[in-house]
Image: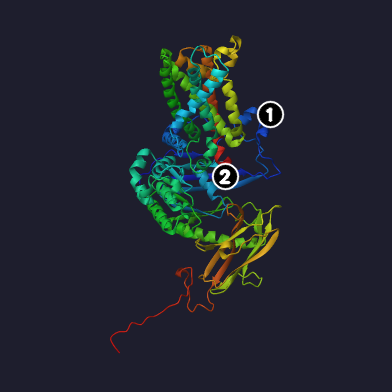
Amino acid sequence: MSEVAIRIEGLGKCYRLRHQGAVRYNTLRDDLVNWMKAPFQFLSGREKKGACEQEDFWALRDISCEIKHGEVVGIIGRNGAGKSTLLKILSRLVDPTEGGADLFGRVGALLEVGTGFHPELTGRENIYLSGAILGMTRHEIQRKFDEIVTFAEIEKFLDTPAKYYSSGMYMRLGFAVAAHLEPEILVVDEVLAVGDVQFQKKCLGKMKDVSVSGRTVLFVSHNMSAIRSLCSRAILLKDGRVAADGDVEKVTEAYMALHTDSKAFAGNLAAHPGASGSKKVVFEWARVGHGDGVENGQFCIGDDLHIEFKIKAGAKVVESFLKLGIMMRSQDGIKLCSLVDSDSGFVMDDFCAECELSVKLEDMRLYPGTYYITLWVGDITSINTYHWVEECLSFEVIDGGKLTSRKLSRAGGLLFWTPEWKKNNIKQGHE
Amino acid sequence: MIACQEKKPYWKIRPQKGWNPLDLLELWAYREVLWMLALRDIKLRYKQTALGVVWVILQPLLPGLIFAVIFGKFARLPSDGQPYLLFVFSGLIPWMLFSNMIQRSGGSLVTEARLITKVYFPRMLVPLASGVSVLVDFFVSMGLMFFLMVLYGVPLQPVLGLLPIFLLTAILLGAGIGLWLSALNVKYRDFMYALPFLVQVWMFATPVVYGMAVVPEKWRFLYSFNPMVGVVEGFRLCFLGKSSVGVEHIALSVGAALAFFILGSLYFRSVERGFADKL
């Protein structure tokens, strides 16, 4: 098939950044004054020329590409590269600032699981509501109702208000409704990052069915193995522009290569491209090593891994209670673990201005390969993120070491375990 | 595959500027969403209440009774020779329709922020659905009115046939102002706080607890620039067959309702594309 499904031409989105203190928020009073000055301009909602000059931030710029009918395209990039903005524009939630896009076919956009769900409504009511909001007709929903219910495995709770559902059930139901949409173009954000492993598998399977059924799919994810197994083509976004576009293997490799750049930021994590959060507390620096204070990113299986970092108050008033987290991802984007300080019985309850911390991971048993570390600091409830530095550190596990006696293939897995083996001889015959 | 001519795009995404006309075709295509949202509002309103649907009856009845006691019994406001309860209730019905419509739709976009930032459908459906859900309450209060009329032995008037005109005017006015307020509320949450006061002041500027007859003749035309004057007195005329309202007052109301609806929807359309960024 050669028909175009999505054509994007010179797409750009500019956000006006407002720095606190420097530029004031638009208040009703300001706007009333403006309105007095130029009533027609204000009423038509047009931005004043020149108002968008100083604090322009282009979340997306000069995006052009064509996606053919039946193509399954993955969109990858770090946090803040513009993936979500692109999806939001393509699903018509926000308007572009320049350029445009044409979509040829009925569009279904899934930016969250359970769009339109209301906790007070029952499962049945929610299926109809969410289905309608996502673009299904009443008739269509009726036809697929049983299928949806079976897929979500909620038969027994169909007439129970959704607020009594477990989070797993909620997710399943949400995905089930979305999965039964039949648009010609499907735009999916990282909805697969939720739910238990079994459910994720089921979702991936469903996504695969969709992708082989000849529909056009645009799929945003951090999960490289999902991207590789679903998509034939990938587009890599970097700083709001297309950095690579083409064969999925090549582009995902290019994405991995982006991480090597991040080492240059080790000295100044606040300026790290993967950083987000309110910056009330920030990571100043971070390193991985062998515990001797020197940065050394090479380890053998069985070595002790030391992650050291310094946190500093970014604001004047800071709570003394903090929560810290460390997340590790494999080369393929598989999340290995989310370490939280309190899980180890460590409580950060007397933070004042700054402090250095070290985390020792004894007897590291990861397979040879490259791993990426994400650091997180937030308040004790983990609701507010102060600083989140995505994949700011990396380390490599190399072959060798005391524990391994054979060459380990990277495809062999992620964990090198050496469990205890026992043998129980069964006597055969008699002596 | 047959090489075919390029189809018309299903969605054409471009930066938009200036005024946008009302896209009735699109609204019609999404009518099921409107219905589902309205249905949800109705279902949610009385969930987890002990009295449930009884509230639908109590909500217009209680203020009616309170006004009847305070203004009818103590203040002895004139009621054109009608039982005061009927008199005030006939005014309360359109007033509550209108005020509930603007109050519910006014805050609707902010309440539905999550939905609006996650999925596309014509944004206008959110305030409109809140408006539609109010209609249910309205029809219940109508039933209550007829019941009260039977109770007081007041016969139905032939002018009742005019009721749809006033009902439509009230709906257009409520929807228009509701659209306007809901859009303004996204930008300035001030409106959320100002709205209850506005509604209260507006009620006393409208002949709900008193009749238009108490307004001096020479001020009536000016008075009827409040578009709810024509509507409320119109309802009273239909139910009780008696009112000081004139054709010119009603015409003003209808004109104002149309203007508010057109301007409100135009304003809404021109700012709706920024909602997802502002919410």
Residue B19 lies, with reference to residue A156, above or below; the image says above
Residue depth check, mark 2 versus mark 1: number of the one nearer the observer: 1
What amino acid type should be assigned to the residue bearing mark 1? Lys
Instruction: Give percent across and percent down for residue B160.
Output: 42, 16
The residue carrying pointer 2 sits among few (fewer than 14), some (14 to 19) or many (20 or more) residues within 10 Å by Cα, namely many
Say whether residue A69 is visible.
Answer: no
- Residue furthest to the top: B217
Residue bearing mark 2: A12
Seen at 43% across and 26% down, the residue is: B139
Residue bearing mark 1: A37
Left or right, residue A422 beside residue A429: right
Lower position in the chain sequence, tag 2 or tag 1: 2
Q: Nearer the viewer, residue A361 or A106?
A: A361
Q: How many marks?
A: 2
Instruction: Say which mark, if any, is on residue A24.
Output: none
Mark 2 and mark 1, same subunit?
A: yes
Picture quarter with the C terminus of chain A: bottom left
Say which chain tag 1 marks: A
Instruction: Give percent across and percent down for residue A218.
Output: 46, 50
